[in-house]
Image: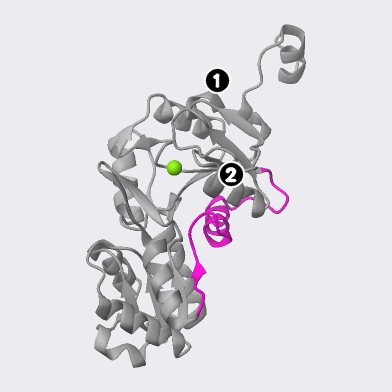
Amino acid sequence: MRSLPTGLMRQLYSWPVALADSYDGFLIDLDGVVWLGHQPIEGAAEALRGLATAGKPFAFVTNSPRISPERQAEILRDHGIETDASRVVTSGSTLIALARERIGEGANVFTTGTPDFLAQVKAAGFELLPAERWPEATGLMISGHDEFSYEELKAASMAARAGAFFAATGRDPTMPMPDGLWPGTGAILAAIETASGQRAIVSGKPERPIFEAGLGVLGLPPGSKVAMIGDRLDTDVGGAQRAGLDGILVAGNESVPPDTGIIPEHRIDALVDLVA
Ligand SMILES: [Mg+2]
């Protein structure tokens, strides 16, 4: 018996093959998959340990630009998930990488976002301009925050109209809060685009840059089979499929919009089903 190959053993005894075995690596969404509002989801840590043991590389891919990859990794470690910031890709870190590539480190930028996001941009080596110095901006990095002002709208739209590199973390019009849907980065971006007549490059899901950044972390050879695991059909599954990846939908919570026309390659109730 000991000499039989695993595959044959499985056939002989009908051992179920874990879904994880069908892929070389994974991109994993955080909110709704690993945690819900930073409360750990049962079995997620166990599933990730299973992937690590099976030698399947994975990276976390999240549309939340407000918290740095370092802080996200700290929260993951608090949940018993061994990882570091190099394995966490956010729409914010992807936007910063895009800007570095296009306008160079140290460029003058006008940036909107939470204090944490502004600190990330500054730490990456960019020179953050105050609104009145918008004519000196070679780049615009737009992310939502709750003190967005007419002054910011004016500076950003005039810089975009003048030809500055124009990029944003996302187009989500709203974000869910306890009392309902608050205006998101997409609403702010729409105002800047309307006023400037220019269209921004977007770093976050469902756009391609964040998936490419995640693949870069995995470092697998070309042709490897990679799946994105997420709880949203439009951003996670649809975006992944457009980027050439498979999409695995975690259908265990309520954030799935109906009738998107997007069909995931697989559907699981929770991350733990991946290794079950
Ligand atoms: Mg999610």
Q: Quadrant of residue 117?
A: bottom left
Where does residue 237 sit, x and y in percent of width and height? 58, 44
Specify which label sits upstream in the sequence, 1 or 2: 2
Asked if one can make out residue 49 in the rendered structure from this viewpoint, the answer is yes
Taking the image as shown, residue 247 lies to the left or right of residue 217, namely right
Residue at which label 2 appears:
237
The magenta-colored residue range is: 198-225
Callout 2 amino acid: Val
Viewer-nearest residue: 25 or 156 = 156
Q: Would you call the spot at circle 2 few (<14 residues within 10 Å), some (14-19), or many (20 or more)?
A: many
273 above or below 72?
above
Disc 1 on helix, strand or loop? loop
Q: Position of residue 164 (x, y in %)?
A: 45, 85
Lateral position of residue 96 relative to residue 260, left or right: left
Q: Quadrant of the N terminus?
A: top right
Q: Secondary structure at mark 2?
A: helix
Rendering quadrant holding ligand 1: top left
- Type of amino acid under label 1: Ala
Q: How is the image coloured?
A: one colour
Graded by Cα atoms within 10 Å as few (under 14), some (14 to 19) or many (20 or more), the crowding at tag 1 reads few
Which quarter of the figure is the C terminus placed in? Answer: top right
Residue 276 — which label?
A: 1
Residue 7 screen position, x and y as percent: 74, 20
Apparent side of residue 16 relative to residue 133 in the rendered image (left or right):
right
Above or below, 71 relative to 229: below
